Every structure is written in C-alpha cells, then in structure tokens.
Amino acid sequence: MKVLVIEDNRELASSIHDFLAAESYICELSHSFGEAYDKLLFFSYDCILLDIMLPDGNGLELLRLIKKEKIQSSILIISARDALDDKVNGLEGGADDYITKPFHLPELHARLRAIYRRKRLEGSHIISFKEITLDTDMLEARVNGVLLDTTKKEFDLLLYFLVNKNRVLSRQAIATHLWGDYTDNLANFDFVYQHVKNLRKKISMVNGTDYIETIYGLGYKFNSSRS
C-alpha cells in the first residue's frame, strides 16, 4: 500500500513512517496543508492519513478539496481531538475511518489494512482471478495452486495488476506506486521492465496464462480476456 501521512508533529510522523516502512509500505510525509495539497495533485496514494490540526490550514478543509478534486484515495483521519463533532464531520465529509491520538501503531496498521481490504479487495485478504490467488496477509502468490517464489516487489506488482485489471498502467505509474514519489525524477524506468519480465517468467514456469500485455510506448495492462 502507498500511504501519504499528513501530520505536522514531525516526531509522530517519523514514527508512523518507520513503522509502516518496516511493514513494507511505501510511505510519504507532508507536514503542512500546502505541502500535502501539492503532493496530492501530482501523485496518487492508496490511503491518506490526515491530521485535522495543521499549521497552515484545517485538515477537514483539505478533505473537502480531496473530494472536490475527485482524488481516489482512502482517508483515515488522525487527530488529538476527541470531540464527537470532529468525528461526525470527518466521516460525513468522506473519510473512511477516524483514530484519536494517542494511539498504538499496530492499531493504526490494523485500521489501514481494514480500509484497504474493504475498498480494494472486497473485504478479503484473499484476491483471486482464474488460476491466480494472492494472500495479502501471508504475502503469498499461487498459480494453479503452486506457490510462486516471488520477491516482495514482484508480489506487490502482481497485486497492483490484479486490482487494476484491464487498465493501462504506465511504467512511471508502476514505479511511483511501488517505489515512491522520488522515482518521478528518474531518467528511465528500465527496472520496471525487468520486474515485469521476471514476474511473467515465474508465472509461465507453472503453466499460468500471461495476462500481462505490453502496451508499446505506454506501459502494461493486465488483460483479463487473455486465455
């Protein structure tokens, strides 16, 4: 999962970043309203952790802008406030969940996973398509019942393809989703080609269908109609 943490408390933001990074998340940080808004306009995230109190604006106003711009990210509000009105306003404004400071990082992690399962994986940690099955809890990929010897990035890449079936994904979009926003400044994305090539090879070795279609000049597409 790729997460943007919008939190002005740098110590807390750093703790969240380190914890999620250890869980193999791609985690980016913003410490102000303006910095966060700029990131949201140029990059995409699976989930946004949004603090209500920011030094240059209100998190609920940023939530309204996110919805106005039709940014397709899940939103988990984090705030020191425990007032009922803040929770109600946040949830009615389009947030998916709300957690109050202080909180334990494992609880935050559990809420993130629950949001992702609910919105992207239809409520389950198992995602299946024909002969392919992924277990996002165990980080296991199976094809025709055979466990694939995938790296973490190859697993994440296959999951990204499965939840975006039949959509053309550019090499830059794949790189940004799996490696973070810093890839925006890279001269080329040849490493994406190598990961796709390795994933295709491993699926073919267990007699799986190669659903990954190369769209020349653009990127790749997981073509569900292939057989």
Image (spheres, rainbow, N blue to C red):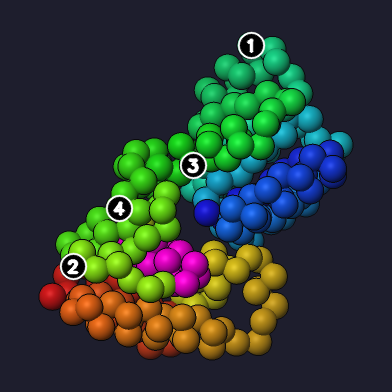
- Whichever of callouts 2 and 3 sits on the residue coming sooner in the sequence is 3
Question: Contact (CB < 8 A) between labels 2 and 1?
Answer: no
Say which residue label 4 marks.
127
Given contact means CB atoms under 8 Å apart, are the residues at marks 4 and 2 in contact?
no
Q: Residue at x 25, y 82 (%)?
A: 204
In the figure, 11 relative to 150: above or below? above
Give the percent coordinates (x, y) of residue 49.
Answer: 64, 40
Tell me the element at label 2: loop
**What residue does disc 2 label?**
144
x and y percentages locating residue 18 in the rendered image: 72, 52
Asked if 105 appears above or below 158 in the picture, the reply is above
Q: Nearer the viewer, mark 4 or mark 1?
A: 4
Q: Give the quadrant of the C terminus.
A: bottom left
Sequence-earlier tag: 4 or 3:
3
- On whether residue 153 falls in the magenta region, the answer is yes
Mark 4 → mark 3, Cα distance in angstroms: 14 Å
Which dot, 2 or 1, sits closer to the camera?
2
Callout 4 amino acid: Ile
Residue type at the position of mark 1: Leu
Inspect this view and state whether residue 167 appears: no
- Expressed as whole percent of the image width and height from the top left, the position of residue 1 reads 52, 54
Spatial CA span between label 1 and label 3: 24 Å
Q: Which residue is mark 1?
A: 84
User: How busy is the neighbourhood of tag 3: few (under 14 within 10 Å), some, or many (20 plus)?
Assistant: some
Residue assigned mark 3: 113
197 on left or right of 90: left
Q: Residue at x 79, y 30 (%)?
A: 53
Tell me the distance, in whole angstroms, between the alpha carbons under discs 2 and 1. 50 Å
Q: What segment carries the magenta color?
A: 151-162
Amino acid marked by disc 2:
Asn
**Crowding at label 4, few (<14), some or many (≥20) Cα neighbours within 10 Å?**
some
Could you tell which of marks 1 and 3 lies nearer the N-terminus?
Answer: 1
